[in-house]
Amino acid sequence: MDTTQGQGEDQGQNLTPDPTQDPPPPPPQDARQGASEDSPQAAEWALTRYATSRGYGAQLPEYLPGGPANAVQIGAPFRVPVAEGGGEDKPPGDWARYIWKAPFSVARQGDLLKGHLAELLKSEPVRELIPRERYFTSARRMDELLRNNVANVESAAVYCQGEIQTDEDRCRDYSVGMEVADKLNPNCVRLANGEGSLQACANCMWNGMHERCSFWKPSPTTPSTGNWGHQRNKPSVSKKAADAAWKELNHGLDTIQQLPTRGAQACADEDWSVVDALVDKQGNHWKTIQHALSIVSQFHSPKPSLPQQPEGN
């Protein structure tokens, strides 16, 4: 990626438009509000929102050589925004606009957006993408991780427009994935009415781990009377999610087995505050175990078909 700091006056415009193609319809007057001549960034954002609000990807620079002098120029240069970490909840800025432009091959096929992005990017972002401290070592690294898969771009978009959950309501697996930390704890951000993988919080959606989220529920399926097959008519999770849940299940069981000994010692010492704390801890571990069991039970390995016996044998 060209990370040149300078920007053209309009990144989204072709250098030599094709005269045989019909020009795209201009954005309505209200979409141009705030895009003054001395604010190319505002003008570019208005064009981006005009496209994404209709379910299309924003126009990106294209390879349009105008002659020998520009034969090696690939579109207009644009920059990766400066990476920022911390715990402040800030209004949408450079990274939110960068996500909505979706300049990632995993996120688009031409002007068509992949996955849930066509649905997600129709809405305005409400906050800037600020991960926890030291999650990304640089802006380039942040950009590289987003380009890994479309789930990471969707995760960032959900964080930029979702609702921050309270400490009582947040996902139990909020520490997995892209944490956005405040001074005490990471924020858990999710959509109010998400469906499918969008039921999960932004942290769990990172790297496609939405099945680990306590907000995610598998879709109901119709029972099958035919042959078994991997994920055929069954709610099934990925092997990666099942392995992680299995490790969590074993850890929870090991911890539960140690609690009675500690509880008996606390009762003998009449340290009732410790007893109360151990009871609460046991209840929390049982919830974690039940959640892990629900994930493991949804993993179905493929069942091989038996070879057919030749007739007459």
Image: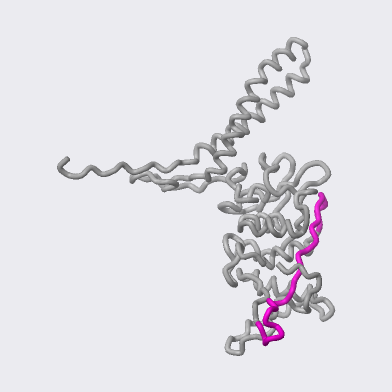
Query: Which residue ends up furthest to the left in the rendered image?
Result: 312
Q: Quadrant of the C terminus?
A: top left
Q: Quadrant of the N terminus?
A: bottom right
Inspect this view and state whether residue 123 appears. yes
Query: Which residue ends up furthest to the bottom in the rendered image?
Result: 19
In this rendered view, identify the residue nearer to me: 150 or 204. Answer: 150
Residue 87 x, y percent position in the rendering? 81, 49
Identify the magenta region.
65-90
In this rendered view, identify the residue nearer to me: 310 or 156. Answer: 310
Figure check: 103 above or below 177: below
Inspect this view and state whether residue 170 appears. no
Figure check: 301 above or below 255: below
Residue at 78%, 42% in the rendered image: 185
Residue 295 x, y percent position in the rendering? 54, 39
Residue 34 x, y percent position in the rendering? 80, 75
Query: Which residue ends up furthest to the front in the rendered image?
Result: 68
Residue at 78%, 56% in the rendered image: 138
**Residue 263: which quarter of the image?**
top right
Figure check: 92 above or below 64: above
| Left or right for 308, reference 31 | left
For residue 84: magenta?
A: yes
Q: Main secondary structure of the magenta part?
A: loop
For residue 9: magenta?
A: no
What color scheme is it?
one colour
Figure check: 256 above or below 294: above
In this rendered view, identify the residue nearer to me: 19 or 93. Answer: 19
Residue at 68%, 78% in the rendered image: 72
Residue 46 x, y percent position in the rendering? 73, 74
**Residue 104: which quarter of the image?**
bottom right
Number of disc labels: 0
Residue at 64%, 61% in the rendered image: 120
